[in-house]
Amino acid sequence: MGTTAARKVRLIIIGDEILSGRRQDKHFSKLVELLSQRGMRLFAAEFISDDRDVIAGVLARSFATNDVVFCCGGIGATPDDQTRQAAAQALGVELRLHPEAARLIAERCADNERRGQGSSDMSLPENQQRLQMGVFPVGAEIVPNPYNKIPGFFIRDHTFMPGFPVMAWPMMEWTLDTRYRELHHQITQVEHSFLVFKLPESRITPALEELEKRWQGVKAFSLPSMGATGQPHIDLGVKGEPAAAAEALAYLRSEALRLGGQLTPPEK
């Protein structure tokens, strides 16, 4: 694991079914929520196909960073699941059945047998196929899966999980709370915003630029909208350290008013 300073959190979603629209991604919003609860934020997200070389290329670049990365999708045992193989390719290591993963998969098969669903005989072809889900790059550690025991894996600050939210989300939480607790609430940041009417974005832009020069580390944002009632407005705001953000917000509000903006919707 790398140092705790300046760690960026990223998300990689793997799956042709997401890119084609057959399924809708749900991991992005959930990870943002989980990070926010821990005083962290998502730096970037990437959506890529199931092609092994594509995945390996993305992961090779990703493994070269100090980032904390969550990867969802493609760790099953069917031909379209290529993430385990691509991770090994990117790292230049072999794939090997992880002994703890093998034990947990066997437990899952035994659980199924007790429910009258299949056999616990691990020599059967279907159970041998299930064991493929425990074949990870050499050096990987397991990520517990409370839903059905079949684990994900962790290597070089990358956590690999299934695409199913019911499995992936508890694995995200476990990883954040077990491996990265020291990153929780490291930096206190706030976000403030207000709505301004009758002000074109082009007129307020110089003030946004001046704000970021005066208050280093504070980010300004401008989100124009027609609004639910059809009244055009801009959601203006700042993000940053509390004291500096408060000063910057006061400046931005005064500039919006000076330039002719209104803080309440104009009467129709």
Image (tube, rainbow, N blue to C red):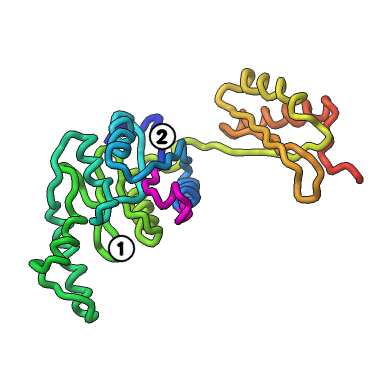
> Visible in this render: residue 176?
no
Residue appearing at x 16%, y 59% in the figure: 131
Q: Residue furthest left?
A: 123
Residue appearing at x 37%, y 58% in the figure: 164
Amino acid beneath label 1: Pro
Q: Give residue 147's quadrant in the image.
A: bottom left
- Give coordinates of residue 20: x percent, y percent: 45, 49
Q: Give residue 198's quadrant in the image.
A: top right
Q: Under tag 2, what secondary structure?
A: loop
Residue appearing at x 37%, y 43% in the figure: 49
- Give coordinates of residue 213: x percent, y percent: 62, 18
- The residue indicated by pointer 2 is 8
Q: Which residues are magenta?
A: 12-26
Q: Is residue 66 above or below residue 24?
A: above
Q: Sequence-wise, which precedes: disc 2 or disc 1? A: 2
* Whether label 2 touches label 1, CB < 8 Å: no
Q: Nearer the viewer, residue 49 or 132?
A: 49
> Visible in this render: residue 227?
yes
Q: Is residue 30 left or right of residue 224?
A: left
Q: Nearer the viewer, residue 59 or 9?
A: 59
Q: Is residue 25 above or below residue 130?
A: above
- The residue indicated by pointer 1 is 146
- Give coordinates of residue 252: x percent, y percent: 72, 28
